[in-house]
Each structure stands twice: as structure tokens, then as C-alpha cells.
Amino acid sequence: MINIKALAESLEFDIEDVYVLVELFIENAQVSLANIEDAIENTNMQAIQNEAHAIKGSAANLMLDDIQELARELEIAAKEKQRINYLSLYSQIEEKIETLHEVQKSYA
């Protein structure tokens, strides 16, 4: 999933700074996920699109390619109002973020 030390080297940041960035990403992504879950329940495609876009951009900044790709899929599906299982994509993103959270905690 993510190697915080390698990411720090790639970004030329201190590992502590990357740790904080990952922590902020997780916190913000969890808020976005809660909003996505509500939006799915209310069939609010614009809210799904907006929140998925936020996760996608933040994940891209941290080179979290798998999260970025899933969020991109969710964003496009909502934008195009596709008939897909939105909860499935939501769950996949949630699972990846939880895994990231476990990795992040191991660096504490």
C-alpha cells in the first residue's frame, strides 16, 4: 500500500512530515467517506462526485494510486449517473484507507 519512508524520500520531506500528511489525509478522507455514504443513501450524485474528487486529489498528492483510482471511478460514475453499485466502490475505498491507517499507526 504505502511505504512512508520511501514516500518521504520521494517527496524530499522528513518522515515525520509525511506521517502528519498521511494522518491528515486519513482524517479528511474519513469525513468525505461519511459524506459519500450519506449521499449514496440520498442518491445525491453531485455530493458523491464532489467528495470522491476530494479524495482523488488528496490521494494523488500522496501517490496513493489505488485509492486515487477507486475515487476516480466513483467520481466519474456519479458524474455520468451510471447505474453501478456505489456502495461497493465506497467500501473498497474505505478498506484501502483503513489499511493505510494501520500502516500509518505502525510508524507511530
Image: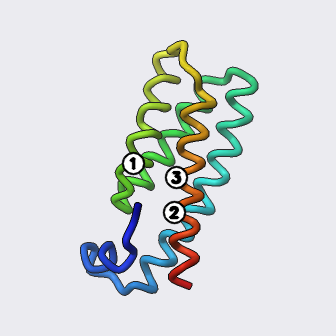
Question: Does residue 40 appear left or right of residue 28 in this picture?
Answer: right
Residue 69 location, quadrant: top left
Mark 1–mark 3 Cα distance, whole angstroms, equals 8 Å
Mark 3–mark 2 Cα distance, whole angstroms, equals 6 Å
The residue labelled by disc 2 is 100
Q: Position of residue 46 (x, y in %)?
A: 58, 26
- Labels 1 and 3 touching (C-beta < 8 A): yes
Q: Where does the C terminus fall, quadrant-wise?
A: bottom right
- The amino acid type of the residue labelled 3 equals Lys
- The amino acid type of the residue labelled 2 equals Leu
- Residue drawn at 52 percent across, 39 percent down: 52
Mark 1–mark 2 Cα distance, whole angstroms, equals 11 Å
The residue labelled by disc 1 is 66
Disc 3 is placed on an element classified as helix
- Residue drawn at 40 percent across, 46 percent down: 68
Disc 1 is placed on an element classified as helix
Binning the other alpha carbons within 10 Å of mark 3 as few (below 14), some (14 to 19) or many (20 upward) gives: some
- Labels 3 and 2 touching (C-beta < 8 A): yes
The residue labelled by disc 3 is 96
